[in-house]
Amino acid sequence: MGGLESETGADFRVSTRVILTAPDGSVLHVGGDRCRDGVERWFTPGGGVEDGEAPAAAAARELYEETALKVAPEALAGPVGHGTYVCFPHGRLLVQKNWYFHLPVERFAPRMLSDIDYERHLTFRWLPDEECGSTDGMLDPWRLVALVKRLRNGDRPAEPVDLGGSYGPRFGD
């Protein structure tokens, strides 16, 4: 038996996400795009880990590219959680291992610096804690909500919490 890629033709990548919590009880989400099913999706900032890059460094880089917030990797707590994301971009299966980091921040006006075409059109929204994970295909969004509440209470998990699986909605290619 081979690995995931050889057995299924899937692409696999490791990714990071950053949970930015503001004092007013909100978490920054990126998105606003609608899939073919009409669902508007919102997700925490983040993206792929490059070859040889440490996950915290990738999280800090992606945070800057997607929000213009510059932080040192050491400023990020975590990883505090992990989950698996699957989708079919361009008709090919992508399986992504997401590592979640945390950073409490004062609410700010983010701006997209990424030059990736689909990211340039995304917008931002500070969503209430209870809505975390509710529109990005998370199968059990309550897991992310529970983690956010723990983090707000100063309870950083000793080991990353399993946030379960999520899936990408159908988008036109």
Image (cartoon, grey):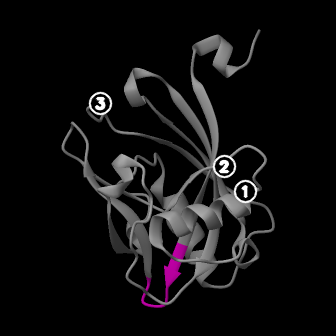
> Where's residue 14, x and y in %?
66, 43
Which image quarter: residue 38?
A: top left
Q: Earlier in the sequence, mark 2 or mark 1?
A: 2
The image quarter in which residue 173 lies: top left
Classify mark 2: residues with Cα within 10 Å, few (<14), some (14-19) or many (20+): many
Q: SS at mark 1?
A: helix
- From the image, tell me which residue sits under label 2: 49
> Is residue 22 shown left or right of residue 16?
left
Q: Element under label 2? A: loop
Q: Which residues are magenta?
A: 20-25
Q: Return the x and y of residue 109 as percentages of the image width and height.
A: 37, 82
Q: Residue at (59%, 68%) from the top-left corner?
A: 147
Give the mark nearer the N terminus: 2 vs 3.
2
Q: Residue at x 56, y 61 (%)?
A: 62
Figure check: 97 above or below 53: above
Where is mark 1, residue-wise?
55
Contact, CB < 8 Å: mark 3 with mark 1?
Answer: no
Mark 2–mark 1 contact, CB under 8 Å?
Answer: yes
Tag 3: residue type? Asp
* Picture disc at residue 173: 3
Check disc 3 and report its element: helix, strand or loop.
loop
Residue 19 in sight: yes
Look at the image and say whether residue 21 sits in the magenta stretch. Answer: yes
Q: Amino acid at mark 1?
A: Pro
Instruction: Look at the image and tell me in which quarter the N terminus lies.
Output: top right
Does the stretch in magenta take in 24?
A: yes
User: Which residue is pictured at 69% across the width and 74% down the height?
Assistant: 76
- Report the residue that reaches farthest toward the left: 38
